[in-house]
Amino acid sequence: MLTIDSLGGFIAVSAYKDRLALLSISMSAGNDIVDKKLFYPPENEGNTINGWDIHRNAVSGTIWSMCFIPKDASQHSKDGYSPVLAVVLNRNGAVLNQLLLLGWNTRENNISVLSRYTDEAGPIATNIVEVPNSFGFALLFRVGDALLMDLRDTQSPSCVYRIDLSILPNIMQQDSVEQSYRGLDGDDEGNFNVAACALLELRDSRMEINKTDDPMSVDNDYGRTASSLKYMCSWDWEQGDLLFPRMIFSLNTGGLFVIEMSSSPDGIRVNVSDCLYRGAPCNKLLWVGGELIAGLVEMGDGTVLQFERGRLLYRSPIQNIAPILDMSVVDYHNEKQDQMFACCGMAPEGSLRIIRSGINVEKLLSTAPTYQGITGTWAMRMNLLDSYHSFLVLSFVEETRVLSVGLSFSDVTDAVGFQPDVSTLACGLVVDRMLVQIYRNAVRLCAPTEGAHSDGLRLPAPICISWFPENVSISLGAVGHNLIVIATSSPCLLYILGVRAVSSHHYELYEMQHVRMQTEVSCISIPQRCLDCQSHTSVDILGSKSDFGLPRGVQIDRTFVIGTHEPSVEILSFTPENVVRVLASGAISLTDALGTAVGGCVPQDVRLVLVDRLYVLSGLRNGMLLRFEWPVSCTAFPSESTTQSTSTASSLAAMNTSLSNMASLSFIRQQYCGWETSETAGGDVPIHLQLIAIRRIGVTPVFLVPLHDSLDADIIALSDRPWLLQTARHSLSYASISFQPATHVTPVRSVDCPKGILFVAESSLHLVEMVHSKRLNVQKFQLGGTPRKVLYHSESRLLVVMRTDLKISPSGSGLLSSSDVCLVDPLSGSLIKSYPFGPGETGKSMQLVKVGNEQVLVVGTSQSAGRPIMPSGEAESSKGSLLVLSIIHAKRDSSSNSSNSGSSSQYSSPLRDQPSCSRLCGSLDDDICDELKEWKEWKFQQVFQTTLPGAVLAVCPYLERYFLASAGNILYVYGFLNDNPQRVKKFALGKTRFTITCLTTRFNRIAVGDCRDGILFYSYQEDLRKLEQLYCDPDQRLVADCNLMDLNTAAVADRRGHFAVLSSKNHFEDNASPECNLMLNCSFYIGETIMSIRKGSFTFKLPADDVLKHCDGADRVVDLSNNSIVASTLLGGVMIFIPISREEYELLEAVQSRLVVHPLTAPILGNDHSEFRGRRSRVGVPKILDGDMLAQFLELTSMQQEAVLALPFGFSERGMSSSSTLPHTPIPVNQVVRLLERVHYALN
């Protein structure tokens, strides 16, 4: 436990029992340092505390709570500030707790007990907390009440006010209930400190009064109690120097109240509010921003609340998936990506969660696959200041359709005025109520009618005007406010067009300038203006930051970015004086580790971004993503100066002035160097953009689509798969979007879907909404009780879930058992069927076992209440059941299959003719209902049952004819005779020393997890019908779960946060034991309890690796998906372990050794990374590399990456192996980046 003085001058740290330390903090050279440290009792006393002062001076017992008591200026001693520490102490065997006041005499440097306070007639005290801005006062929380303590006289503490918690109401006003209906109800006392106890290997006497010292209690229901006494379980003070401090607190009943303290002539007045909100009891409260309250729940979702007119209103959830009790990793039907079905939380907050990688999207609408040949999608507004889009443009190979955006999508192509029989290259809003269509032969300006939009013209037909280039075809273009830029390929010309008003509703297109290009333009992007910018105002898009080198006086509407086939990216500006200027240019010249030029570096898309600084993003046609920055200083990158200085000129050149229709052009073409700025060169020399970061995100061309029209908008990078690029990060930071590979994407904002995004994938349109408010990509299904186990039944496409802690109906009309197995629809979370166990019977394990062509469910239960394992590791004397259930189905009478097969013929026009899709937000439910009608009815049927001498904690399929079951320390081998699930026979049994906790098999190898002896390898001899132990664990470990990676290698997780890989390939020859020990290959200390580990299907390579055969190391990339491991933890963590080759390990080990000490990436608190990850590991055993630490390398810029790798090997972390030869040689940046990109791609 730790507490800090309100002035920040002192820190108190307590051990779990009998000891605490006080530290004094002072400022030195601008940094906080510890100048004094004192232990209590003193270190020389150690554990030999004498009886002469044990009751007065020694902290003998467990410290439940502590805080510093502030003093006013008049109480400060002349020799310095002597802090007073209030401690709530639970002495061993004592019924009540004591309040101790400890004083630190900083002059004499000793600690003494100033006074003790115990109310013999009162309830037990739990916590002490100081009252801010009230010197000498503190609140003492007890079970049933709270005391306001006057501690100004440290020798005589007294209570000045008592708050009776028993009389506080449990209900709120009705209007508050309506606003907070999403709050969670219920309580889960007795388990809210289990996670911390399991992690720290401690026991909290407050919460463990009804428990015994059982190391396996994290799995048990034993000890859960329901108390009628009220007590405060969390609180927080309102921030700021307030005259009247206010505290919000949560009771164990789930009610939230506010205490306000004020001064009066009679003393301090304490006012307690009515119940402001009721939900689940909060384990932690945080009062932020004056109005917002964040409440965290121990084993359920928290809430964000807001004060409004004296009430607390629900605003949003805080996701909490802890604890993850079990999981199943499945490539679910038609999802084309792995997802995890997880059992999370405890009753009453237990739920089934679907966890996916990447950013969560909510699917609102999907059409039939009738949209072949789409070449582009755009969303357009009718007016610049509109909040929502008005039109959706779909371009096909030889056709264009314009759809209205609203409650329904309808075809308004004719009312808008777009040419329908051509393929659109680009389109957009050029001025209010004037739309532009760019196609191969012309640029078309359209004024829509009222039939397309309410702000349209009241005319029978739209007004359309076209501009045609002379004897050339348009290859691409872009539309901005008052600016249109198009390019041609033969010859390579760049046209700049403008729009001017002729009359009230009549505009015309006119050519402002065109220039010849040295190389063909590959892409054009015009930055969209912020909505609060005035239309014709001269704006410096860097504001006052002129040191970035952009000329002042440039209109943002006249600045655009192009990509060329040189290849390069260039920022151009068209001034009112008809001058086209190159503001900045960046050449693209990439090489691999062998110095070979990387092909396909032509920009496919380019964007100008302004977040803190100006930079350019470019997506290349070879699947790479680049970031160029406007230079801050005059120095180019040393590693790039040679390559970049060879590009000496922009691709823009002046055309011959004798050409007809050519305006005067004063662009000056001349050589330039990378370190010259436009100011130093008189404004005529382009700035050389610096290449800051390079990433490969796929193998197909990269398209960049901003989420909204502003320079700081996040961007969707679309390649082989969609990624969300976070523009505010200082390098290239992107996360995958949980959606299938798509060819086109555009944001579509409407009143019904303000955050809508339209994807085109597999010839279908998919309208989704990106859920940014969720930290995790998780879908939640509330099933009731505590979900314990989950499996995926592939034949029915349903989930099989084992539940405990169900509420038994007292009347007998509802549930008669507190545990069951049930079938759950993974789309809607609907409960299909349930199989309840007998009264007093609790489900413990289950697995699907194949019998012939059928899959049956083997279930293990416990028929006794309480813990199944004694603290010694031996099994309790109890009984369990072994069940075999068939999952059978019967066809429904509905003929929905025939109706569904003909529905695809309705999609003759995009979205327009879909009866079920007229309302966007309700269409997904209709689709789910239609699919549910097609499904068959599934149910359980018991075919076998037997009773075993112990709780059946583990079952597992074995080969194709058997299954294994464990009861206590006995391992059974069962089989099906003649592939008949009703004919089950026991073939063999074997015994271990302690209780078996888990089982796993691979071919004929059996791995047994023992609660004391660790992992054991067995084999079954069919001819002898005998189990034979082959290998044993060299260490004792309390196995939580295990998984066989191959016949000789097992991944093992224990309850103390340690993960290890053991192998039987090379056992120790000098082992004194007659048994053969397994060899510890590598280990990793996680720091939290792992509950389950499963195989993953992560392919450790990029799609680009299949085509980059010339790259160094590409030929060594193999699919190691069968050996990938996914682990879930008690605290809600999900961790993935991927095997790599020895060469890759040595390379990344050298990188990690530098990352852990570099100031940019080292642990914030300066902890020893190697010591932490190597806890409980043997000396000399390799450590599994820390992926979170290595992932930081991708967040760095190229210069920072080089700086990290340039650290000498002597700077590496203490204890890092120096046997490798790689750290002594220069480490190539691109080789490290490419390797980490493959891992990043696989996991996202």
Image: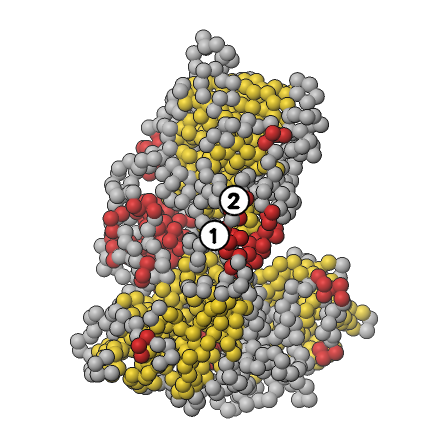
Is 77 located above or below residue 1233 in the figure? Answer: below
Q: Earlier in the sequence, mark 2 or mark 1?
A: 1
Residue 1116 shows up from this direction: yes
**Residue drawn 72% across the image and 74% down it:** 170
List the residue tagged with mark 1: 738
Furthest residue toward left: 1069
Give the crowd class for mark 2: few <14, some 14-19, many >=20 residues within 10 Å.
Answer: few
Is 93 located above or below residue 978 in the figure? Answer: below
Is 492 located above or below residue 1183 in the figure? Answer: above
**Residue drawn 46% across the image and 58% down it:** 356
Closer-to-camera residue (719/209): 719
> Residue 52 at x, y = what percent?
52, 91
List the residue tagged with mark 2: 905
Question: To which quarter of the image does residue 498 belong?
Answer: top right
Q: Position of 118 compared to 581: left or right? A: right
Q: Position of 310 compared to 948: left or right? A: right
> Residue 469 at x, y = what percent?
49, 17
Q: Secondary structure at mark 1?
A: loop
Total marks in image: 2
**Residue drawn 56% across the image and 77% down it:** 806
Say which amino acid is labelled 1. Ser
Furthest residue toward right: 265
Question: To which quarter of the image does residue 77 belong?
Answer: bottom right
Give the crowd class for mark 1: few <14, some 14-19, many >=20 residues within 10 Å.
Answer: many
Q: Secondary structure at mark 2?
A: helix
